[in-house]
Image (spheres, rainbow, N blue to C red):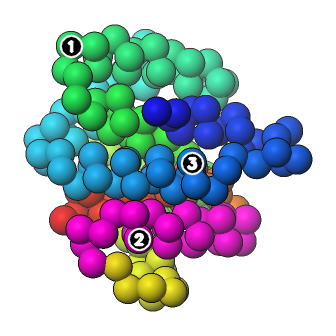
């Protein structure tokens, strides 16, 4: 199964002449959604904490490509011992971590720091990111063409893909960030 790292490459402007096929995008979204919804919340929390820890320590870099490469390597090592949907779940988390700055502007981060200092920064930042993800998920629900039941992952994957394809440019976020944010929000708030 291809992961979002590869989608990052295939959906970049350099590949605009040959976009990643819709069926493969939707199949990936369906599997990522199913994995996130079926995973115990403790598993999601543990993977999120792991990715956050390595992103802030051994994978810290001013260059997204280096951070991505390091995170991908660390996630592969971590998932070897866990198996199951670990690679898919970690993929969603890594894409979210790398794209948080698309959702929370520099000005918003500075404002949090001015108001709260470093004491509550992480908690407030996390709530702000979650709120931004909630807005995307709400808009998806309001604009979807079909009504999908919660267990209809293929239906929701089609709607999610269509929504993110149509709105990612308008919202100035990559398709991958849009999809991962909504998948994560739905998964942790079920």
10 in magenta: no
Looking at the rendering, the stretch of residues picked out in magenta corresponds to 149-170
Residue 167 vs 93, above or below: the answer is: below
Residue at 27% from the left image edge and 46% from the top image edge:
35
Q: Main secondary structure of the magenta part?
A: helix
Depth check, front residue: 100 or 150: 150
Disc 1 on helix, strand or loop? helix
Check if residue 155 falls in the magenta segment: yes
Nearest the camera: 93 or 153? 153
Residue 109 seen from this side:
no
Judged from this view, the residue extending furthest toward the front is 23
Cα separation, mark 2 vs mark 1, equals: 32 Å
Q: Earlier in the sequence, mark 1 or mark 3?
A: 3
- For disc 1, the marked residue is 81
Task: Give me the disc on residue 155.
Answer: 2
Mark 3: give few (<14), some (14-19) or many (20+) Cα within 10 Å: few
Query: Is residue 83 in view from this perspective?
Result: yes
Horizontal and vertical percent position of residue 160: 49, 67
62 relative to 118 in the view: left or right: right
Q: Residue at x 76, y 42 (%)?
A: 12
Q: Position of residue 24 (x, y in %)?
A: 57, 48
Quarter of the image with the C terminus is bottom left
Residue where numbered disc 3 is placed: 24
């Amino acid at each position: 199964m291809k992961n979002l790292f590869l989608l990052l490459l295939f959906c970049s402007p350099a590949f605009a002449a040959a976009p990643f096929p819709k069926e493969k995008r939707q199949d990936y979204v369906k599997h990522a959604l199913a994995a996130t919804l079926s995973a115990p919340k403790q598993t999601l929390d543990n993977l999120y904490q792991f990715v956050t820890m390595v992103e802030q320590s051994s994978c810290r870099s001013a260059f997204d490509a280096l951070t991505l490469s390091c995170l991908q390597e660390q996630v592969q090592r971590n998932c070897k011992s866990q198996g199951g949907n670990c690679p898919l779940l970690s993929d969603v988390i890594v894409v979210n971590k790398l794209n948080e700055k698309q959702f929370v502007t520099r000005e918003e981060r500075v404002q949090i720091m001015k108001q709260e200092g470093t004491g509550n920064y992480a908690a407030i930042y996390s709530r702000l990111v979650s709120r931004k993800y909630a807005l995307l998920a709400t808009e998806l629900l309001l604009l979807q063409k079909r009504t999908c039941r919660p267990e209809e992952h293929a239906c929701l994957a089609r709607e999610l893909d269509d929504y993110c394809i149509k709105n990612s440019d308008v919202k100035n976020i990559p398709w991958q960030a849009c999809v991962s944010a909504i998948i994560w929000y739905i998964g942790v708030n079920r």
